[in-house]
Amino acid sequence: MCLNNEMWSLNRLAFNIQNSMVINRTFLHHISLADGVDKVVKWNCRNHSCYILDVDRSCRGNPPRTGFGGLLRNNNGFFISGFSRFIANSFDILFTELFAIFNGLCMVNTLGITDFVCYSDSLHSVSLINGPLMKFCVYATLLSVLFSL
């Protein structure tokens, strides 16, 4: 929905979720686990007692369809807030990840939350944010805003 920038009815959304579940169940039915034991998968707070913001991005297709989003949960895994956005005609994964982090920090700031951890799977983004500000980096303006938040 987010990448096509379109709205779906609840019936269409429910149908697509159910259809995806059937496809996944059919696919996973043919895969056997090495130890033959079902594994329970759940959200992990990674031993933090604060809020946790997870952000990620996605890019595919030609013309490119790029999107990003984030989820804010408390340390018990309960959903607090989230966001998703679409960037038209962009293959710039680094910019998209940085922009996802920016949007997540803006969301947390708007909610007045100060005790949180932000997770990103982009080592390059995290290195740019944690490292010294490079004045001549193409993302210098966005990074300077991230430093100020």
Image: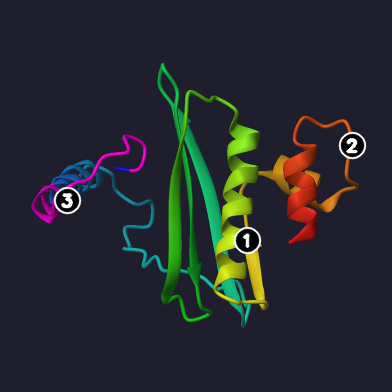
Residue of label 1: 105
Q: Earlier in the sequence, mark 3 or mark 2?
A: 3
Dot 3 falls on a residue whose secondary structure is helix
Report the Cα–Cα distance between label 3 and label 1. Answer: 29 Å
**Which quadrant is the C terminus positioned in?**
bottom right
Dot 2 falls on a residue whose secondary structure is loop
Residue 3, how many percent across, how many down? 36, 37
Q: Earlier in the sequence, mark 3 or mark 1?
A: 3
Around disc 3, counting alpha carbons within 10 Å, would you say few (fewer than 14), some (14 to 19), or many (20 or more)?
few
Residue of label 3: 13
Residue of label 2: 135
Q: Residue 5 sits in which quadrant?
A: top left
The answer to whether residue 16 is left or right of residue 128 is left
Residue 78, how many percent across, how many down? 42, 77
Amino acid type, residue under disc 2 in the picture: Lys
The magenta region covers 2-15
Badges 3 and 2: C-beta atoms under 8 Å apart?
A: no
